[in-house]
Amino acid sequence: MFAKTAPIGTTWSERGKRPVMRVKGTRGRTNVISAIAPHGRLWFRCFQNLNSALFIEYLDALLHDLRGHIVLVMDKHPAHISAATRRHMNALGPPHRALPAWLRTRHEPR
C-alpha cells in the first residue's frame, strides 16, 4: 500500500504549547501488486481497492504471460487469504503454489 501524500513531519512550537500543522487535501492509498521474473521483467497493477476477484484476475493474466514454476510471496492481505483465492490456487495445481503459511508468518515484519 502506498500513500498518495507524504507523511506529516514534525514542526516546532513554544515550550508547553502543542504544535499544530494544517494540511490541505485528503489522504488516499493505492494497493500495488507486482511480479518480477528471473530475467528482470516486471509486471504490476495498481488498485484503489484490491479484492479477491481483482487479485485472481491479476494471477490469471500473469500465468498467461509466464510459463513454468511460479513462487508466490503473499502477505495476509484479505485478497490473498480469501476462500475464493484459495479455491483458485488449488484449481491451478501443484506448479503454482504460495509459500506455506508458517513461513509467511515467521518472516513478516512486525
Image (cartoon, grey):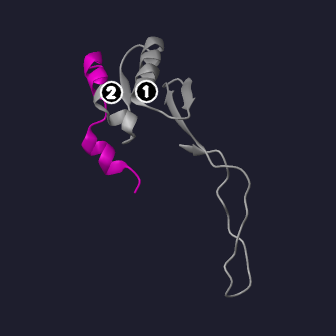
- Was residue 108 drawn as part of the magenta stretch in this picture? yes
The reply to whether discs 1 and 2 touch (Cβ–Cβ < 8 Å) is yes
- Residue at numbered disc 1: 55
Question: In the shown orientation, is residue 88 left or right of residue 19?
Answer: left
Q: Which residues are magenta?
A: 86-110
Q: How many C-alpha atoms fall within 10 Å of the one at disc 2: few (<14), some, or many (≥20)?
A: some
Q: Position of residue 64 (x, y in %)?
A: 45, 12
Amino acid type, mark 2? Thr
Per the rendering, the mark at residue 85 is 2
Q: Position of residue 21 (x, y in %)?
A: 72, 67
Say whether residue 3 is visible. yes
**Which residue lies at the image location 38% right of the left edge and 30% below the top edge?**
72
Amino acid type, mark 1? Phe
In the image as oriented, which residue stretches furthest toward the bottom? 16
Distance between the Cα atoms at labels 1 and 2? 8 Å
> Regarding mark 2 in the picture, which secondary structure is present there?
helix
